[in-house]
Amino acid sequence: MTEIVQIKRDVSALKGASKVSRIPIKIEPSDPKRKPEWIRAKVPNHPEVTRLKSLLREHQLHTVCEEAACPNLGECFTHGTATFLIMGNICTRRCPFCDVAHGKPDALDENEPNHLARTIATMKLKHVVVTSVDRDDLRDGGSAHFTRCIAEIRKQSPQTRIEVLVPDFRGRMDVALEELAKSPPDIFNHNLESIPRLYKAVRPGSDYQWSLNLIKNFQKIHPDVPTKSGLMLGLGETLEEVQQVMQDLYDHGCRMLTLGQYLQPSRHHLAVERFVTPTEFDQLAKVAKEMGFEHVASGPMVRSSYHADLQAQGEHVS
Protein backbone atom coordinates (compact mmCIF):
# COMPACT_ATOMS: atom_id res chain seq x y z
CA MET A 1 0.00 0.00 0.00
CA THR A 2 2.85 2.39 0.80
CA GLU A 3 4.32 1.83 -2.66
CA ILE A 4 1.03 2.67 -4.40
CA VAL A 5 0.60 5.88 -2.41
CA GLN A 6 4.15 6.94 -3.29
CA ILE A 7 3.52 6.36 -7.01
CA LYS A 8 0.42 8.56 -6.89
CA ARG A 9 2.29 11.28 -5.04
CA ASP A 10 5.08 11.34 -7.63
CA VAL A 11 2.59 11.53 -10.52
CA SER A 12 0.64 14.34 -8.89
CA ALA A 13 3.82 16.43 -8.94
CA LEU A 14 3.75 16.16 -12.76
CA LYS A 15 0.30 17.72 -13.08
CA GLY A 16 -1.11 21.23 -12.78
CA ALA A 17 1.27 24.16 -12.98
CA SER A 18 4.36 22.06 -13.71
CA LYS A 19 2.62 20.42 -16.67
CA VAL A 20 1.52 23.60 -18.45
CA SER A 21 4.57 25.73 -17.64
CA ARG A 22 6.17 25.29 -21.07
CA ILE A 23 3.27 25.37 -23.51
CA PRO A 24 3.16 28.05 -26.29
CA ILE A 25 0.21 29.99 -24.86
CA LYS A 26 0.60 30.74 -21.16
CA ILE A 27 -2.30 30.10 -18.84
CA GLU A 28 -3.21 32.50 -16.09
CA PRO A 29 -4.36 30.45 -13.06
CA SER A 30 -8.06 30.88 -12.43
CA ASP A 31 -10.59 29.20 -10.17
CA PRO A 32 -13.08 26.97 -12.02
CA LYS A 33 -16.38 28.68 -12.79
CA ARG A 34 -19.50 27.65 -10.93
CA LYS A 35 -21.36 25.01 -12.93
CA PRO A 36 -24.94 25.57 -14.08
CA GLU A 37 -27.77 23.39 -12.82
CA TRP A 38 -27.72 21.14 -15.89
CA ILE A 39 -24.23 19.84 -15.05
CA ARG A 40 -24.40 17.36 -12.22
CA ALA A 41 -21.98 14.49 -11.63
CA LYS A 42 -22.73 11.48 -9.47
CA VAL A 43 -20.59 11.38 -6.31
CA PRO A 44 -18.28 8.32 -6.63
CA ASN A 45 -18.93 6.81 -3.19
CA HIS A 46 -20.83 3.67 -4.23
CA PRO A 47 -19.42 0.31 -3.01
CA GLU A 48 -19.05 -0.78 -6.65
CA VAL A 49 -16.66 2.13 -7.24
CA THR A 50 -14.46 0.90 -4.41
CA ARG A 51 -14.63 -2.67 -5.71
CA LEU A 52 -13.60 -1.72 -9.23
CA LYS A 53 -10.75 0.48 -8.03
CA SER A 54 -9.48 -2.41 -5.93
CA LEU A 55 -9.67 -4.76 -8.92
CA LEU A 56 -7.78 -2.30 -11.11
CA ARG A 57 -5.02 -1.88 -8.52
CA GLU A 58 -4.79 -5.65 -8.10
CA HIS A 59 -4.05 -6.04 -11.81
CA GLN A 60 -1.84 -2.92 -11.93
CA LEU A 61 -4.14 -1.16 -14.40
CA HIS A 62 -5.07 2.48 -14.87
CA THR A 63 -8.29 4.05 -16.14
CA VAL A 64 -8.65 7.37 -17.88
CA CYS A 65 -11.71 7.78 -15.67
CA GLU A 66 -9.40 8.26 -12.67
CA GLU A 67 -6.32 9.83 -14.28
CA ALA A 68 -8.25 12.48 -16.21
CA ALA A 69 -10.66 13.18 -13.32
CA CYS A 70 -13.71 12.37 -15.45
CA PRO A 71 -16.94 13.74 -13.93
CA ASN A 72 -18.80 10.55 -14.90
CA LEU A 73 -16.54 8.20 -12.92
CA GLY A 74 -19.17 7.48 -10.26
CA GLU A 75 -21.90 6.70 -12.77
CA CYS A 76 -19.75 4.52 -15.05
CA PHE A 77 -18.00 2.60 -12.27
CA THR A 78 -21.35 1.98 -10.58
CA HIS A 79 -22.52 0.34 -13.81
CA GLY A 80 -19.34 -1.76 -13.98
CA THR A 81 -17.82 -0.01 -16.99
CA ALA A 82 -14.47 1.70 -17.41
CA THR A 83 -12.14 3.09 -20.06
CA PHE A 84 -8.78 1.43 -19.62
CA LEU A 85 -5.63 3.52 -19.89
CA ILE A 86 -2.67 1.52 -21.19
CA MET A 87 1.05 2.29 -21.42
CA GLY A 88 1.18 4.01 -18.04
CA ASN A 89 -0.29 7.19 -16.61
CA ILE A 90 2.39 9.68 -17.66
CA CYS A 91 1.95 11.44 -21.02
CA THR A 92 4.58 12.98 -23.30
CA ARG A 93 2.26 15.87 -24.24
CA ARG A 94 1.26 18.94 -22.22
CA CYS A 95 -2.36 19.50 -23.33
CA PRO A 96 -3.73 22.10 -20.86
CA PHE A 97 -7.29 20.75 -20.87
CA CYS A 98 -6.23 17.33 -19.60
CA ASP A 99 -5.44 16.26 -16.03
CA VAL A 100 -3.17 13.35 -16.96
CA ALA A 101 0.42 13.88 -15.76
CA HIS A 102 3.21 14.96 -18.13
CA GLY A 103 6.76 13.65 -17.92
CA LYS A 104 9.08 10.85 -18.96
CA PRO A 105 6.99 7.65 -19.10
CA ASP A 106 8.06 4.32 -17.69
CA ALA A 107 9.03 1.43 -19.95
CA LEU A 108 6.12 -0.57 -21.35
CA ASP A 109 4.80 -3.35 -19.14
CA GLU A 110 4.97 -6.47 -21.30
CA ASN A 111 2.46 -8.17 -19.00
CA GLU A 112 -0.12 -5.42 -19.39
CA PRO A 113 -2.04 -7.01 -22.31
CA ASN A 114 -2.58 -10.18 -20.26
CA HIS A 115 -3.48 -8.25 -17.10
CA LEU A 116 -5.92 -6.10 -19.08
CA ALA A 117 -7.59 -9.05 -20.80
CA ARG A 118 -7.84 -11.00 -17.55
CA THR A 119 -9.51 -8.07 -15.80
CA ILE A 120 -12.01 -7.58 -18.64
CA ALA A 121 -12.81 -11.30 -18.57
CA THR A 122 -13.32 -11.15 -14.79
CA MET A 123 -15.65 -8.17 -15.17
CA LYS A 124 -17.50 -9.95 -18.04
CA LEU A 125 -17.67 -6.75 -20.06
CA LYS A 126 -19.50 -6.75 -23.40
CA HIS A 127 -17.94 -3.49 -24.61
CA VAL A 128 -14.60 -2.03 -23.57
CA VAL A 129 -12.75 1.14 -24.47
CA VAL A 130 -8.96 1.03 -24.49
CA THR A 131 -7.08 4.31 -24.66
CA SER A 132 -3.58 5.51 -23.86
CA VAL A 133 -1.39 8.42 -23.01
CA ASP A 134 0.68 9.87 -25.87
CA ARG A 135 3.92 7.93 -26.19
CA ASP A 136 6.09 10.08 -28.47
CA ASP A 137 9.10 8.30 -26.95
CA LEU A 138 8.25 5.05 -28.75
CA ARG A 139 9.20 4.35 -32.38
CA ASP A 140 5.67 3.24 -33.25
CA GLY A 141 3.88 5.58 -30.87
CA GLY A 142 2.65 2.57 -28.93
CA SER A 143 0.58 1.10 -31.76
CA ALA A 144 2.08 -2.40 -31.40
CA HIS A 145 1.11 -2.39 -27.72
CA PHE A 146 -2.46 -1.49 -28.71
CA THR A 147 -2.46 -4.43 -31.10
CA ARG A 148 -1.19 -6.83 -28.45
CA CYS A 149 -3.90 -5.66 -26.05
CA ILE A 150 -6.64 -6.11 -28.67
CA ALA A 151 -5.40 -9.60 -29.57
CA GLU A 152 -5.21 -10.69 -25.93
CA ILE A 153 -8.69 -9.36 -25.12
CA ARG A 154 -10.11 -11.28 -28.10
CA LYS A 155 -8.32 -14.39 -26.91
CA GLN A 156 -9.70 -14.24 -23.37
CA SER A 157 -13.06 -12.55 -24.09
CA PRO A 158 -14.02 -13.37 -27.69
CA GLN A 159 -17.52 -11.89 -27.29
CA THR A 160 -16.30 -8.49 -26.07
CA ARG A 161 -16.59 -5.56 -28.47
CA ILE A 162 -13.35 -3.56 -28.48
CA GLU A 163 -13.20 0.19 -29.04
CA VAL A 164 -9.84 1.95 -29.09
CA LEU A 165 -9.36 5.66 -28.45
CA VAL A 166 -5.93 6.31 -29.92
CA PRO A 167 -3.50 9.25 -29.83
CA ASP A 168 -2.45 10.88 -33.10
CA PHE A 169 0.75 8.80 -33.55
CA ARG A 170 2.48 12.02 -34.60
CA GLY A 171 5.10 11.36 -37.30
CA ARG A 172 4.38 7.62 -37.16
CA MET A 173 1.06 7.23 -38.96
CA ASP A 174 2.19 4.65 -41.54
CA VAL A 175 3.86 2.47 -38.92
CA ALA A 176 0.90 2.77 -36.58
CA LEU A 177 -1.69 1.88 -39.22
CA GLU A 178 0.40 -1.09 -40.32
CA GLU A 179 0.56 -2.34 -36.72
CA LEU A 180 -3.16 -1.84 -36.07
CA ALA A 181 -3.97 -3.78 -39.26
CA LYS A 182 -2.65 -6.91 -37.54
CA SER A 183 -5.57 -6.91 -35.11
CA PRO A 184 -8.08 -4.13 -35.90
CA PRO A 185 -10.53 -2.97 -33.22
CA ASP A 186 -14.30 -3.07 -33.61
CA ILE A 187 -14.46 0.75 -33.36
CA PHE A 188 -11.62 3.19 -34.09
CA ASN A 189 -11.81 6.47 -32.15
CA HIS A 190 -9.50 9.47 -32.35
CA ASN A 191 -10.63 12.79 -30.86
CA LEU A 192 -10.09 16.12 -32.58
CA GLU A 193 -10.99 17.77 -29.24
CA SER A 194 -11.39 21.31 -30.57
CA ILE A 195 -11.59 23.59 -33.61
CA PRO A 196 -8.41 24.34 -35.64
CA ARG A 197 -8.29 28.01 -34.53
CA LEU A 198 -7.78 26.90 -30.93
CA TYR A 199 -5.30 24.08 -31.54
CA LYS A 200 -2.21 25.99 -30.45
CA ALA A 201 -3.84 26.67 -27.08
CA VAL A 202 -5.76 23.42 -26.61
CA ARG A 203 -3.63 20.76 -28.30
CA PRO A 204 -0.02 22.02 -28.44
CA GLY A 205 2.09 19.50 -30.33
CA SER A 206 -0.86 18.22 -32.37
CA ASP A 207 -2.04 19.05 -35.88
CA TYR A 208 -5.67 19.32 -36.97
CA GLN A 209 -5.19 18.03 -40.51
CA TRP A 210 -2.94 15.21 -39.33
CA SER A 211 -5.70 13.97 -37.01
CA LEU A 212 -8.27 14.15 -39.81
CA ASN A 213 -5.95 12.18 -42.08
CA LEU A 214 -5.42 9.52 -39.41
CA ILE A 215 -9.16 8.91 -39.32
CA LYS A 216 -9.45 8.98 -43.11
CA ASN A 217 -6.53 6.62 -43.71
CA PHE A 218 -7.70 4.09 -41.13
CA GLN A 219 -11.19 4.12 -42.61
CA LYS A 220 -9.80 3.53 -46.13
CA ILE A 221 -7.86 0.49 -44.93
CA HIS A 222 -10.72 -0.85 -42.78
CA PRO A 223 -13.99 0.30 -44.41
CA ASP A 224 -16.03 -2.07 -42.24
CA VAL A 225 -14.71 -0.66 -38.93
CA PRO A 226 -16.68 2.40 -37.74
CA THR A 227 -14.61 5.52 -37.08
CA LYS A 228 -15.44 7.90 -34.26
CA SER A 229 -14.28 11.29 -32.96
CA GLY A 230 -15.22 13.84 -30.33
CA LEU A 231 -15.13 17.52 -29.45
CA MET A 232 -15.29 19.34 -26.14
CA LEU A 233 -17.11 22.67 -26.21
CA GLY A 234 -16.92 25.81 -24.14
CA LEU A 235 -13.36 26.92 -24.92
CA GLY A 236 -14.22 29.91 -27.09
CA GLU A 237 -15.38 28.24 -30.29
CA THR A 238 -18.48 29.36 -32.18
CA LEU A 239 -21.24 26.94 -33.11
CA GLU A 240 -20.47 27.67 -36.77
CA GLU A 241 -16.85 26.57 -36.21
CA VAL A 242 -18.06 23.40 -34.51
CA GLN A 243 -20.31 22.62 -37.46
CA GLN A 244 -17.38 23.08 -39.84
CA VAL A 245 -15.31 20.59 -37.84
CA MET A 246 -18.24 18.18 -37.92
CA GLN A 247 -18.34 18.53 -41.71
CA ASP A 248 -14.57 17.99 -41.94
CA LEU A 249 -14.90 14.81 -39.89
CA TYR A 250 -17.73 13.51 -42.05
CA ASP A 251 -15.78 14.29 -45.22
CA HIS A 252 -12.85 12.27 -43.84
CA GLY A 253 -14.95 9.17 -43.21
CA CYS A 254 -15.95 9.62 -39.57
CA ARG A 255 -19.46 8.32 -38.83
CA MET A 256 -19.70 8.41 -35.01
CA LEU A 257 -19.55 11.69 -33.08
CA THR A 258 -19.47 12.82 -29.45
CA LEU A 259 -19.93 16.40 -28.25
CA GLY A 260 -19.55 17.37 -24.59
CA GLN A 261 -18.89 20.32 -22.28
CA TYR A 262 -15.28 21.02 -21.28
CA LEU A 263 -14.82 21.26 -17.51
CA GLN A 264 -11.71 22.82 -15.99
CA PRO A 265 -9.81 20.18 -13.92
CA SER A 266 -7.91 22.73 -11.80
CA ARG A 267 -7.04 26.42 -11.59
CA HIS A 268 -3.91 25.72 -13.66
CA HIS A 269 -5.83 24.36 -16.65
CA LEU A 270 -7.61 26.18 -19.46
CA ALA A 271 -10.58 28.14 -18.19
CA VAL A 272 -14.12 27.46 -19.35
CA GLU A 273 -15.16 30.34 -21.60
CA ARG A 274 -18.84 29.46 -21.41
CA PHE A 275 -21.23 26.64 -20.57
CA VAL A 276 -22.99 25.42 -23.70
CA THR A 277 -26.70 24.88 -23.07
CA PRO A 278 -28.51 21.54 -23.48
CA THR A 279 -30.58 23.14 -26.23
CA GLU A 280 -27.44 24.00 -28.19
CA PHE A 281 -26.15 20.44 -27.79
CA ASP A 282 -29.49 19.16 -29.12
CA GLN A 283 -29.26 21.53 -32.08
CA LEU A 284 -25.75 20.31 -32.92
CA ALA A 285 -26.91 16.70 -32.69
CA LYS A 286 -29.67 17.47 -35.18
CA VAL A 287 -27.19 19.09 -37.58
CA ALA A 288 -24.83 16.10 -37.26
CA LYS A 289 -27.63 13.67 -38.05
CA GLU A 290 -28.60 15.75 -41.08
CA MET A 291 -24.97 15.66 -42.26
CA GLY A 292 -25.12 11.88 -42.24
CA PHE A 293 -23.47 10.83 -38.98
CA GLU A 294 -24.83 7.41 -38.02
CA HIS A 295 -24.40 7.75 -34.24
CA VAL A 296 -24.31 11.01 -32.29
CA ALA A 297 -23.93 11.55 -28.54
CA SER A 298 -24.31 15.23 -27.68
CA GLY A 299 -24.82 16.74 -24.23
CA PRO A 300 -23.08 18.60 -21.42
CA MET A 301 -21.94 15.44 -19.60
CA VAL A 302 -21.09 13.41 -22.71
CA ARG A 303 -17.49 12.23 -23.01
CA SER A 304 -15.84 10.23 -25.75
CA SER A 305 -16.32 6.93 -23.96
CA TYR A 306 -19.39 7.84 -21.87
CA HIS A 307 -21.93 5.04 -22.41
CA ALA A 308 -19.76 3.86 -25.30
CA ASP A 309 -21.67 0.58 -25.37
CA LEU A 310 -24.94 2.43 -25.96
CA GLN A 311 -23.31 4.69 -28.55
CA ALA A 312 -22.07 1.63 -30.43
CA GLN A 313 -25.62 0.25 -30.50
CA GLY A 314 -26.95 3.52 -31.86
CA GLU A 315 -28.88 4.51 -28.75
CA HIS A 316 -29.34 8.19 -27.91
CA VAL A 317 -26.94 9.52 -25.27
CA SER A 318 -27.07 13.05 -23.86
Image: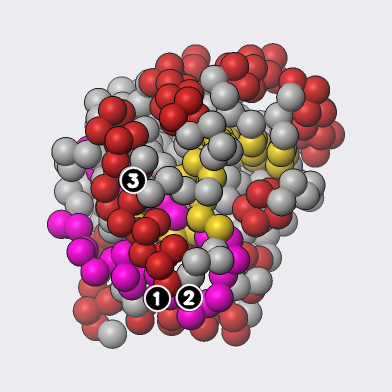
Amino acid marked by disc 3: Lys
Answer whether labels 1 and 2 touch (C-beta < 8 Å).
Answer: yes
- Up-down: is 174 above or below 4? above
Residue 24 appears anywhere in the view: yes
Q: Nearer the viewer, mark 3 or mark 1?
A: 3
Amino acid marked by disc 2: Ala
Q: CA distance from mark 3 to mark 1?
A: 21 Å
Disc 1 on helix, strand or loop? helix
Q: Residue at the spot x=77%, y=49% of the render?
A: 315
- Closer to the camera, 165 or 243? 165
Amino acid marked by disc 1: Arg
Residue 238 appears anywhere in the view: no
Q: Which label sits on residue 121?
A: 2
The tag earlier along the polypeptide, 3 or 2, is: 2
Q: Which residue is mark 1?
A: 118
Which residues, given as a range, are shown in magenta? 107-136
| Residue 57 lies in quadrant | bottom left
In the image, taking residue 250 as reference, residue 16 lies left or right, namely left
